[in-house]
Amino acid sequence: MDHCIYCKIIKGELPSYTIYEDDNFKAILDIFPSSLGHTLIIPKHHYQGLFDLGEKESKEIINFSKKIAGVLKEVLGCDGMNILQNNGQAAGQTVFHYHMHLIPRYENDTINMGWKPLEPTQEELKLTLDKIKSAIK
């Protein structure tokens, strides 16, 4: 992917604050962090999003992320962590190379994740539940 910023980082064409890497993944500090220590987990193979990952890759990225998240928690002493991944422009994805965010959180931080809860009716919840359950194999 010639125009992918993360592919360029993986190839060493662009600099990064690399925390750790193995044969399949790279963990780097986000240069526009939500909190200090905000880390991106990036596969070395280009996948546009979650739906492009195979089962093996999905398991591997979770295990890699858990390892890095544990180190962040230990070293930074954070009280919690947001672990998130956006898929598609409507979900806030801006770089279309799969990546996971590890965002250290503290009891009194002022980070606003921007989520505004809905207040669905019981009927709306039930209809949604039935629709989803009927599609699971």
Image (cartoon, rainbow, N blue to C red):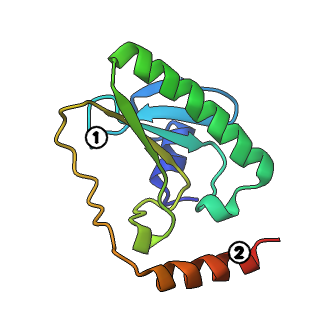
Q: Compared with residue 113, is residue 131 higher up or lower down, i.e. above or below?
A: below
> Residue at the spot x=66%, y=81% of the render?
130
Q: Which mark is residue 135?
A: none
Direction top: furthest residue = 75
Residue topped by disc 2: 133
- Per the image, label 2 sits on a secondary structure element best described as helix
Residue 87 visible within the image: yes
21 relative to 35 in the view: left or right: right
- Per the image, label 1 sits on a secondary structure element best described as loop
Q: Please provide percent x and percent y for residue 104.
A: 35, 32
27 relative to 63 in the view: left or right: left
Lower sequence index among marks 1 and 2: 1
Q: Compared with residue 72, is residue 129 higher up or lower down, i.e. above or below?
A: below
Count the numbered circles shown. 2
Label 2: how many residues lie within 10 Å, few (<14), some (14-19) or many (20+)?
A: few
Residue topped by disc 1: 33
**Amino acid type at mark 1:** Pro
